[in-house]
Amino acid sequence: MRFSLALPAIGLLALAIGGCSSNRLAQSMPGQTPESINANAPAYGHTGGPLVPANYPNAGTTAPAPAPQTRVFTVYFAFGKATLSPEARSVIEEAAGAAKQGSITHITVTGHTDTVGSERYNQRLSERRAASVQAELTAEGVPSDEIVASGVGKSDLAVPTAEGVKEPRNRRVVITEGGPGA
């Protein structure tokens, strides 16, 4: 006897739950688009988007803006030189175009050397390389107040080598757009 009374009660419960969530079922049907789901929204003033109680934390706020994208460009130099090759100018032109096109507000230009020569010589060479890239970026229309240039000499090698090794991939300037300080 108990079993026969339980079945109708379960049926009523299922109907009650199903009736309350019929809109939810329509929203999860395959082929539904956000527009067709909103067309099925109840007629009590909901204008789309998720139903969130007004007292829910952060209700009515928008998601935070995404962090600025960081872009990195690398300019390579000949041994012992700080002059720009045609290939280097092409990379700088691309970096300048990207900076002017986006909303980049901070560009870091870092000069590097290989391990041939003294610390003092390489520090000055890395600074000259960074300055030549900064000057070219400015000539390409990037405001100079958006660029911070520095040299790090023979520290922070791209390819770790012993002292006195000529490694072309270490003779570079790295242009970083965005990131910290942006």
Image (cartoon, grey):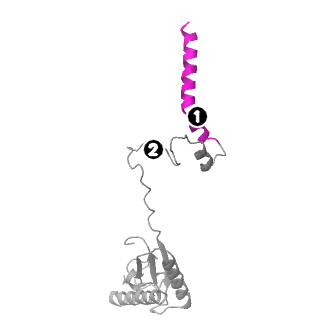
- Residue 13 magenta-drawn? yes
Residue at far left of view: 120
Give yes or no for contact between labels 1 and 2 (Cβ–Cβ under 8 Å). Answer: no
Which portion, as a residue range, is magenta?
A: 1-29
Residue 9, placed above or below residue 17: above
Horizontal and vertical percent for residue 15?
57, 25
Q: How many marks?
A: 2
For the question of whether residue 147 can be seen, the reply is: no
Residue 117: image tag: none
* Residue wearing tag 2: 52
Q: Residues within 10 Å of mark 2 (few under 14, many from 20)?
A: few
Disc 2, SS: loop
Residue closest to the eye, 124 or 92: 92
Quarter of the rendering occupied by the N terminus: top right
Q: Is residue 151 above or below residue 104?
A: below
Graded by Cα atoms within 10 Å as few (under 14), some (14 to 19) or many (20 or more), the crowding at tag 1 reads: few
Task: Find residue 18 and report its image quarter.
Answer: top right
Q: Quadrant of residue 151?
A: bottom left
Amino acid marked by disc 1: Ser
The residue that label 1 is drawn on is 22
Position of residue 152 measured from the top left corner of the image (x, y, whole percent): 36, 82
